[in-house]
Image (cartoon, grey):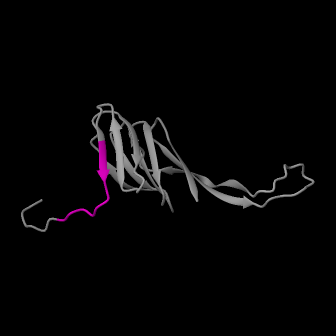
Amino acid sequence: QWSIVAGGGNGEMWLQDIHSSVIEASGGNNNKQPTTDKPNMQLFMENSVQAIKPNHQGPVIGLASRPGGIIVSIAHDGILRITQTFPTPKALLGLGGYKVWVGSVCIDSEGKRLISDGRDDVVVVHDFSKDPEVNDDEGDL
């Protein structure tokens, strides 16, 4: 299953599910369709377009994805948001604090680090490759 995700200048994001089907090779036919000796892939849109909530409060300017139905969006509201798209869209995490407009966002090849940049010439790396450390000492936060 594939999905197309789009973000708008109003902060909205939308999801369209797409599925594929292989059409077997065809010899001669009477439908005046092109003949081919190789199977073809045909794409089908399923269901209706779904809104991904919550909306950003500024234009969405960057999207990245990783296998497993996870997308990352970043907008001029200073929020980098991680969203699950399958089986239903659901916001998982929002990372705020970007002080200037961001330029782009990407996910590393292992899917464990988010990399973003901004107009302040700073590259930010959020590393999710390790489990968070838990401090069991009393009095320490």
Q: Is residue 30 above or below residue 99?
A: below
| Figure quadrant of residue 78 | top left
Question: Which residue is pictured at 57% across the width and 56% down the height?
Answer: 2
Q: Can you say which quadrant of the picture contains the N terminus?
A: bottom right
Q: Is residue 130 above or below residue 52?
A: below
Magenta includes 133? yes
Question: Which residue is pictured at 30% across the width and 47% down the height?
Answer: 125
Q: Nearer the viewer, residue 99 or 58?
A: 99
Q: Position of residue 111 (x, y in %)?
A: 40, 56
Question: Which residue is pictured at 30% across the width and 32% down the height?
Answer: 121
Q: Is residue 87 left or right of residue 45?
A: left
Q: Is residue 102 above or below residue 36?
A: above
Q: Characterize the magenta stretch by its predominant secondary structure.
A: loop
Magenta includes 80? no
Q: Is residue 133 left or right of residue 93?
A: left
Question: Which residue is pictured at 90% across the width and 56% down the height?
Answer: 28
Region in magenta: 124-134
